Image (cartoon, helix red, strand yellow):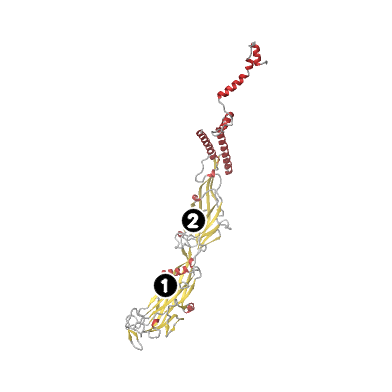
Amino acid sequence: MLLRIKKRFGVMFLITTIMIFIVLPLSLPTNFASNKEQLNINLSGETTHTDVLWLDNPTFEDPIEPIWFPDIEGDESDVDTSTSLNQANVVIVGESREKEVLLNTATQSNWMAFLKSDLEIVPQRASVPYYGIDDDGAWCSHWWWEGEGGGQPKNTPRMHWKTNVSMPVDMSDYIITSLSFNAIINASVDRNIDVDGDTTARWVPGVAGINQFQTYDYARFYVEVTTLDIDVLNTYRIAFNQTRILGNDTLSFYDIEGYIGIYEEQAIIDALNNVLAVDPGHNNFTIVLGIYMYCEDNYSGTDRDHWDDIRFKFLNLTFSYEKKINQFTFGSWAQDLDEISGSNIQITDANLNFKYKIDKNWTESSQNSKFLIFINERKFDPKMSLIDYEYSSDFQEAGRFDITEILLPYENFTLSIQVFLAEDFELESNRTISITDVYLYISYIETFSDIFSEPWVFAGLFIIAVFAATVLGGYLIAYQSYLKYPVPVRKVRKYRKTLSSDKTPGVGIVSQKTSFSKHYHAELKKTDKFLKGAPLDGKIVRDKLIGKQ
């Protein structure tokens, strides 16, 4: 029994489902499918729209805004936008500057002597500190007498001078492109300075020969760049010189003057970049000049070394730097456009064309920057590299670009023409990229169904169809399970549902034989009184049985 009921309900469910799926496709709106996959319905007609201009003010007539509006993403200091007669501009902001740091007569007041460490020995003469800055530069002097009271430990004097340099801009947004550096050093010593080849450690008051040596006597000159707090971990040497024959007696070589030895240009640029990178504002650094003298003990108790005048006479550090353009920055002009709407829209063609120019050839330092086209967030690459542009005072055709693949119906969308900067690079001056005559032509087909084409009509039909299918299915289920039986059978079926093995039925049930016998004897009792006694005339009997009519 249960199996028959399940089969019956299964058949009813199948019938209902079939009815819904028959009605559903006829009531769906035709734009329910995408423009790529549309429902196959019976068509009664279609309208073709060809080359419809889908934007306003393509020639950038005043006022350009708010119809067209600019957008900048990334480093906003790298890009600007502007408008002029019949054109919209994206300006890539370039700049070139130069910084010069000098030590000369005019700038000596910018320099100051200092000790980098409390452990340093200051140059002295007769136990008096001897150093300073004058019109001829930064200088010091040291006379080491081994036999002088307390003189023995003073054989390694050192002196430093510094100037703090402040840049007018945040150098993290600039790139040092070239650098030059030179410094002139000068030294005068007496013949007691001992070098390789000398034989006398002290000339007066008595002559004393050299009886011990390892490195002889020498002076070191060096230049460093560092942070304002002279952090040893962020200090970089950019120039160095150490004397080798200064003081040679055979050559009478007691005076020198010349350029200090310097590091390679890129090494000095790297040093400056490293120091500026750790500065809080990326705009301050310090230049340090250093002189170190070593007096070797060549004759116990009697050696004398006279460094009469050791100095930096001149220094010039000059470097050029240009505006840094940050990767992935872009500027664009855009316009918000209406959706392509109607009945069962199919876009067949969408073409964009525009004209452009750049006020000079694009920089070689950015090979991959280009134009991009966007519909909302969907990108189209027209393969227009800015490096390929050849300067002309006139606007050039960008080309005709088929952007159908990124265009969809039934959505409001934004068209954006973007100048995309693909790498970090330096730019010495502005580049202005201008566009005009922007045209977007769209072709599409609008199809109409047999009866209605408006979406709200289809929505109503869909609701009615679902309701009708539900009512019909419900009636079929009710008919199969209840309504098709006669009333007595329904009562019996209803009564049967109340029966169970757990309780006695509410009505007594007798067998068919008993019920028949009961009714049979009841009918016989009606005739018993007429059949008792003597036989009577047949007519009389008949009249009594049926009564007179």
Q: Residue furthest right?
A: 548
Judging by the rendered image, the residue that carries numbered circle 2 is: 372
Q: Nearer the viewer, residue 236 or 366?
A: 236
At 43% from the left and 84% from the top, the residue drawn is 127
Q: Nearer the viewer, residue 40 or 190?
A: 190
Mark 2 vs 1, N-terminal side: 1
Under mark 1, the amino acid is Ile
Residue 42 % position (x, y): 53, 39
Which quarter of the image is occupied by the C terminus?
A: top right
The vertical placement of 387 against 447, above or below, is below
Residue 86 % position (x, y): 55, 58
Q: Looking at the image, can residue 47 be seen?
A: no
Q: Nearer the viewer, residue 341 or 193?
A: 193
The vertical placement of 438 against 446, above or below, is below
Under mark 2, the amino acid is Leu
The vertical placement of 182 against 9, above or below, is below
Is the residue under label 1 in contact with that under label 2 (CB below 8 Å)?
no
Say left or right for 424 vs 297.
right
The vertical placement of 463 against 313, above or below, is above
Residue 228 % position (x, y): 48, 72
In front: mark 2 or mark 1?
Answer: 1
Q: Image quarter for residue 470?
A: top right
Say left or right for 306 vs 166.
left
Dot 2 falls on a residue whose secondary structure is strand
Judging by the rendered image, the residue that carries numbered circle 1 is: 238
Q: Residue furthest bottom?
A: 205
Q: Looking at the image, how many numbered discs can be counted on the residues?
A: 2
Disc sitting over residue 99 in the figure? none
